[in-house]
Image: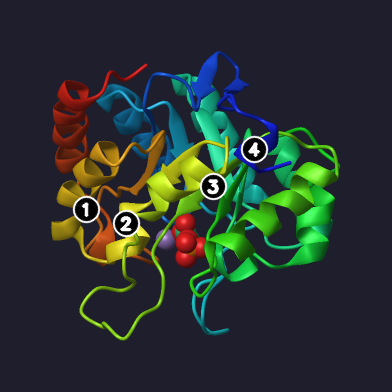
Amino acid sequence: LASRDFHPDNTVIEVKGVKIGGEDLVVMGGPCAVETPEQIDEIARLVKAAGGQVLRGGAFKPRTGPYSFQGIGIEGLKWMKDAGEKYGLLTITEVMAPEFVDVCAEYADIMQVGTRNMQNFDLLRKLGTIQNPVLLKRGFSSTYDEWLNAAEYILAGGNPNVMLCERGIRTFETYTRNTFDLAAIPVIQQLSHLPVIADPSHATGRRELVETMTKASVAAGANGLIIEMHTDPDNSATGDGVQSLFPDQFANLLKELEQLSPLL
Ligand code: PEP
Ligand code: MN
């Protein structure tokens, strides 16, 4: 079902008037994690003002260690929904376990599957039973074939609204947090009809590389971007501050992108 062989036309996912996978680039921006109602409200305002269409933010965080901040939980989903509605943005949030799919789908428009859960097959099967769009991140050690097979689980369950997100893979290089596999964008678009979203934030792990790799993603044909942005990334961010753009950097980047590809 994911293969272009059996579905030659690009899939365009439409959510509340926003088309993902169509002519226009879709930009998702926001913090790594939802932290407070004020934080997510202010960042939503900035994402909208910059021209973004989707507010990102994790309420359930898949942290490498158990003692790191694990996310606000359901309360955070509510704050994000309020902020999205107030500013007219769609919302995307990560869902980590099958039993939380329904509550996440109640509060957020798009379900994110993180890199660590790409092959959580129970989660994928559960996401196949709803109709909310799913952004499926590539496992950091997964091949294209494994990634497309993970998408297949969701599609086979009856949810056709899947987009694929390249967020970097693990290589021997340690300077960047991950190695951004830019070629994944055109390769997946050749193999599949599903929209491809690039995540230059997690792919590089370094704020100073995000702008360049965002433009590279657009040049490579990405249908959209998911970019971390925070009002105080160096001090108050609970995670991923070093890769999060400042609001003015985010706004400037979107302005420059308009010249590369029309925003909605
Ligand atoms: C995130 O988007 O904040 C995140 C945890 O991403 P990934 O699963 O790609 O590490
Ligand atoms: Mn993050």
* Ligand 1 is within 8 Å of the C-beta of the residue at disc 4: no
Q: Which residue is mark 4?
A: 5
Residue 210 disc label: 1
Work out which quarter of the rendered image holds the C terminus and state it: top left
Task: Identify the amino acid type marked 1.
Answer: Val
Q: Position of residue 52 (x, y in %)?
A: 35, 28
Question: Mark 2 or 3 closer to N-term?
Answer: 3
Give the residue at mark 3: 164
Could you tell me which secondary element the residue under label 3 belongs to?
A: strand
The numbered mark, 3 or 4, whose residue comes first in the sequence reads 4
Judge whether residue 37 can be spotted in this image. Answer: no
Closer to the camera in the image, 154 or 78: 154
Q: Is residue 245 left or right of residue 52?
A: left
Callout 1 secondary element: helix
Q: Which residue is mark 2?
A: 201
Circle 3 or circle 1, nearest the eye: 3
- Circle nearer the N terminus (1, 4): 4
Three-letter amino acid code at the position of disc 4 = Asp
Upstream in sequence: badge 3 or badge 1: 3
Instruction: Name the residue at 22% across, 51% down.
Output: 213
